[in-house]
Structure formats: C-alpha cells, structure tokens
Image: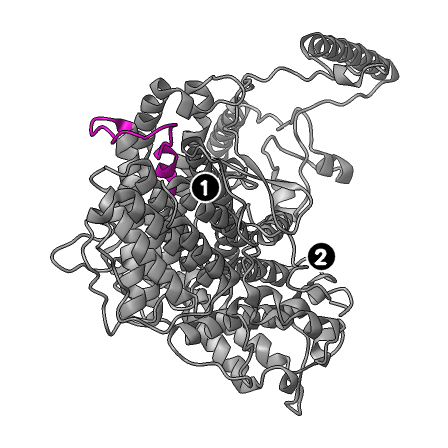
Amino acid sequence: MFTTFPSAASCKATSSTTSASSTFTQSARPRQKRTQVRRACDWCRTHRIKCDDNYPCLNCQTRRGQCSNDRTGGIRTLPHAYREIERLRERQKELQDELDQERSLSRSQSKPLVLTPSSPESLTYPADANDSPHGYWDGIYIRTPQSSMDTWYGPSSLVYFISRMSAFLASRCSQGRLVSPPSLTPKELSSGLDNQLENPTNKADRITPHDHIKAEEVLTPAQEEYFFDLYWQSYHTSLPVLNEAGFRNHYKSLWSGSGKNRKQSALIDIVIAVCMQYGVARARINGVSSKASDVDAGDAALAGRSYYCRCQTILAHERDSPTIATLQCNILSTIWLCCASLQNMADNTLALTARTAQRLGLHLPPPPDASPCERELRKRLWWSIYVLETKTNMKLGRPFLLHPSRTNCGLPGDDHDAVSLSGSSLAPLDPRVTWLSWNLHNTKLVLAARSVYVAFYDKYPDLFGGNDGQTIYDAPSALEPYADFLIAQMKALESWVEDDVPDALKTRRQNHGAAFSTDGSPLDIEQFAPLWLRQQRLLLELLYHNLCANLYRPFISFKPGSPPPPSPASSAASCARRCAAHAIAATLITRQALAATDVLAGWHEAVEWQWSCAVTLAGFALAYPDAELASGAREAVGAAGEVLEAYGRGFAVAASAAGVVRGLGEALDRIAGPSQSDTKIRLGPAASRPMMSQGEQAAGRADDEGSGRSGEGPAIADVLDVAMELALAVDGYDGGNMWWPGMEAAGL
C-alpha cells in the first residue's frame, strides 16, 4: 500500500548519466562551414552585403540591382596598364604592315589610266574580257528633219530595216535613187499653230506656278469629268500608275468654295491632256464630226497641248525635289509625247523618269513603314517605267537605261487584296484573275521579250567577226546558226503564252481557232464585256505579235540581185516566215477590231504597231516575191493601208502612213505581176477619204510617175524615200519647235 520512491543518491546518478549522454551527442555533430563566394558582384560589393555564386545573384534579383559579376578581371595596377598599352601598339603595327602589303599587291596587278601631256591619244584603259573589235551590230545614222545632228537608230529599229530595203533597191536599179519627194510633214501638224502660240489669247496658256486655273477658259468641270471617265476606262487599266480614290479626293480638294477656280495641279493637267488626245481621236475615228466650237478641232495628236504645257511649267519647279506625283506626271508626259509622234522627246522624258524613280528608291523593296497601299503603288510605278523603257529602246534599237541586276523590287500584285488597295472597284474576272492581272502578265511578256532581245544581240559578236562595213548578211554561214539560236530563245515567249496567260485575258476565236496564234482565225469578241476588258485582251495579243515580228525581222534578208525563194529547210528563212506570219496576224486583228468595235479607236500605239507591220510585210514581199507567204503578205499590206486610212481620220500621221502603204502595195503588185495583184482586202464599206496630207499627195505623184517606167526599182525607191521620212516622223522628231515655233515668245 505504500509507494516506494527512489533515493536521492539514485536520482543524482541517473541525472549525471543523462547529462553526459547529451553532451556526447552534441560534440559528435560536424560544425557547419560558412558559405563564401569567390568574387562578389559590383552591386553587392558597393552596398557591402553578402553575395552568392549565382548570376544574377539573389540580392540583385530581389532588389533589382545591376548584377555585373562577369568573372572578368580588369587592369588594377599601373604596371599592368603599361603592359597592355605596349601590346596594343605592337598589334597596330602588325595590322599596318599587312595593309601596306595588300595595297602594294593591288597596285602591281591593276592597269591605271596613263595620260602623257604630249599625246592625248595615249589614254589606255584596263582590259575588259567582253571587249571585242565588233561588239556592236552597227545601226544607222539619220538626220531628222528638225535636227542639225545625225541621230542613231539600232539594228532592231524600223528605220534600219527601211535603210536595208533602200540599199537593196539601189543595188537592183541601174538608174539609182531618184530625188526624194517633198518633205512628209503632215500639214495638220505644222499649220495653224504659229499664230496661236506667238499671240496667245488664252490666259491659261501663260500660267504662273501660283496662279489659279480658270476652268471656264479651257474646259468646264463637266468636260473634265468626261475625260476623267475616259481615263479610268482606258489608260488606267493598261497603265495603273494612279490610285483612283486618291486622285478623285485630290481633284475635289483643288476647287475653291465658289467652284469657279481650280488650284494648280500638274497631275490633273497631264491626265486631261492625255485623255483629250485619246478622246478626240476616238470620236473622229468613230465618225463623230468636229465643230469649230469643239475642244481642239485640229489634229488629235495636238489635243490637250495647253494642259501639257502647263503641266511642264509646274513640273519645272519640282525637278529638284521630286515626289511620287512628279513621277506620275513624267510617266503620263511620256505617253502624251509618244501619241504626239515626238518619240525622241518621249525618250528624253522617259530617261528623266527612270532617274527620278531611282532617286525615290522605287527599284528597291518598299520602306518598312510604308502603308500596304503605298507599297503596291510603288511597285506598279516601277514596273510601268521599266516596261515603257524596255519597249521604247527595243523599238529604237538603243541601249537600256534600267537593268534587272539593279532591281530588287518584286512584281506588282494582282490578287483581290491588291485590288482593294488600288482605289478602283472594277469587277473581278474570276476567282484568280482581276483587272490588275493584265498589268502583271503584260510585264512578264515584256520581260520575256527583253531576255530574248538581249541574248540575241549579245550573241552577234560571237558568230560574226567580219571586217568594217560588213554585216552578218555578208556571211551566210553565220546567219543559219544565228537563226537557230533565236528560235531556241523564242521558246520563252511560247512558254509565256502556254503557261502564264489566263483564259480570261484571251480573246476567243471563231472556227476553233487559237488565241495568240498565227492561224488567221477571226476574232470572237465578247459583246457584253466591259470596254476595259476587251481592250486589255486585244492590246496584250497585239503586243505579243508585234514583239515577235520585231524579233524575227532581222532575218528578212536583202541580197544584191534577184533573191531566190527561201528554202523551207533554212532556219533563217523560217524566221522570216514567222516574222511575216505574226505581222499578218496583228494586221488582221486590228482590222477586225477597228471595223466591228470601237475598242482600239483613238489608241495611238495601235497606229505605230500597224505602221511597223505594214513596212515589215512590204519588206518580206520585196525580198521573197515568189515565196508561199508572199501573196498573203501583199494582201495584208493592202489591209494595213485601210487600217491606217481609218486611223487617219483622227491622226494626221496615220493619214500620211496610209498614203505610203498604198504606194508600197501598188509597187509590190507590179513586181508580182497581174496574176497576183487582183486580190484586195477592204476594211468594210468604202468610207469617205480622210484628210489628204502632203505625204499622200507625194506618194500619189510617185505612183503616177512610176507607172510609166520600165522596171519596178525606181518607183518603189521613191516610195521608200517617203517611208523613211515618215518613219522619222513617227519615231523621231528631236524637238517641238516645228509644232510650237512661238513657245518661247508665249512664255511656256
């Protein structure tokens, strides 16, 4: 019943044992080491706090410090700094020695220009691997009527082709060439303008850069709106260099509150000038008579000249600081000059346009900060200039100014997004083809033709190395491989037709004919398609045929004596036949389109194409009078004369060309004999005779005088003299003084 408690001694012993055990356990644990870092970061060292080996350290992460613990040591002592300076000096000396060695090696390998004071002719140049004594196919120097200097035309030009025809006839004619007929300057181009510009009565003709343009003195706002509508249906769809919505807003902003005065705008003026040319010629070709009260009752080529002059006056103040609007004005000024038959002035303006485009950087990708609308417009502008420059220099046979190697700008878009950015709301043709697709495929066609052109003429020195004064026509052995080379290169254009052109941009044919072919099948022009679409289709195919004819034309060979019929197995003869076939196809298309529709009425480029085709066909029939295709070529020459006569109602140059072509056709019929001269192709019912120019009268006199001669040589030589003068009229006046002799007096 009693509890037993341990004694005091026992409790003391137990307590001692427990204390000893606890002391032993604590002494057995290892002592924890202090965490140390090899080198604290700059921020922790500055604030004298503990750092760690992480990067960035924990303190810099939590307190947002700039951790600079990059584990690199700097120069901390003065001897260390001296050693580093000495090392850098030695390295600089080594690099300077290497640079001196490279410079001395470059001087020993180069050939600097050497000029001695006593002999300027001793100027030498570094050798060029591409240099050759016959690196160029010689063209021809011709003095244009209004120039005191000779003008050079290349071997691809129509002027050079006519000179070869004339040389051939001179070699066949024992009497030599006769005196040239009177100058073939169409009277409508030179008469009636002197008094107008020497004593201008229109105050708008004497505009200063800050004046308002009084619309009632030239055109009313309603008349200007009429010509704007023509532009959107014609030039805009084939030369998309304007944003329609932006242009309309710009035009509205120019009118003052009263609505009577319009502020200056070079862009508005040149658009009106171009459309006045087109509209006046189109109305006259369609049979609409002109009255004295109508705008520009004279030749349609001069329509809008007041607006053109005002545009140039305003542009003169923008040459040093051009803008996109300046570039657009230069492009349209080139078009106006081409339609006015001022080809050399147009060439000069085009060169200025190309340089302006490069100054604005259009040959490079658009700036990153440019809007999508501006990016597409810049690309369309650049490639429009590129196409114009290529077509002009291929036509005149002159060197190109723009080169693809220096172009880094992508092709313009033609999808629905690009259409939405263009400011125009034209209906799409199908899910993948829009109104901008024509511009893209037209650009691809010109690029393909240019590649063939460059390869063909660059190949000339490799195949022909004749003496001075000789051409490849004097080396028949070189002509055949040259023709084989061209046939192989022309596959690029054939591939464009087969692979690139969508069906929506092709004009259908009757009798199961093929578009872009030379089968001669009639057109099946869609009746209810919009005007711009029918125009796009015809212009694309006509350009294709004319490019092909011009590329094949050098193989129409004129040799002394009566030329034999071309051998079917000859590649050169095959190229000549293809040239004639494409020229015939273009003539038939133009004839039917002009007779059945008004799509090509007023389109001046069609006049140039038809004139080129007519002379080409006359040359083929003259060189190969007994060939199988010669009869068709002679008939097509007659059809070309009818086409040019119809265009002559609007353009005086076309009326002159019609007279020359009629003379060529009658001379060719005399060469062929009566058995093959009874077939004529007429352009619909006989119409009233167009304006008679000096050229038509001269050609008629040449025919009358030649009909009584024995032999065809002198008669056709006279006609070719006229044709050469007309070729210069169509392709080459140097200035506008003939048209505007009082320009300086008028202050324009």
Task: Give residue 80's mark.
Answer: none
Region in magenta: 550-571
220 or 405, which is in the foreground?
220
Indicate whether residue 711 is drawn in magenta.
Answer: no
For label 2, the crowd category at 10 Å Cα-Cα, with few meaning under 14, some 14 to 19 and many 20 or more, is: few
Q: Name the residue under label 2.
A: 319
Q: Circle 1 — which element?
A: helix
Q: How many labels does the image show?
A: 2
Closer to the camera in the image, 110 or 688: 688
Q: Is residue 213 left or right of residue 86?
A: left
Q: At which x and y percent is residue 216? A: 63, 87
Q: Is the magenta stretch mostly helix, strand or loop?
A: loop
Q: In this view, does 251 lie to the left or right of 585?
A: right
Secondary structure beneath label 2: loop
Q: Decide: is 119 above or below 300.
A: above
Q: In this view, does 203 lie to the left or right of 250?
A: right
Note whether residue 498 is visible.
Answer: no
Q: Which amino acid does label 2 sit on?
A: Arg
| Sequence order check, earlier mark of 2 and 1 | 1
Is 276 or 497 nearer to us in this picture?
Answer: 276
Q: Residues within 10 Å of mark 1 (few under 14, many from 20)?
A: many
C-alpha gap between disc 2 and disc 1: 38 Å
Pointer 1 residue: 162
Image quarter hosting the C terminus? bottom right
State yes or no: residue 568 in magenta.
yes
Is residue 174 among what the camera can see?
yes
- Nearest the eye: 436 or 550: 550
Could you tell me residue 505's position as x and y percent?
28, 58
Q: Residue at x 54, y 54 (%)?
A: 729
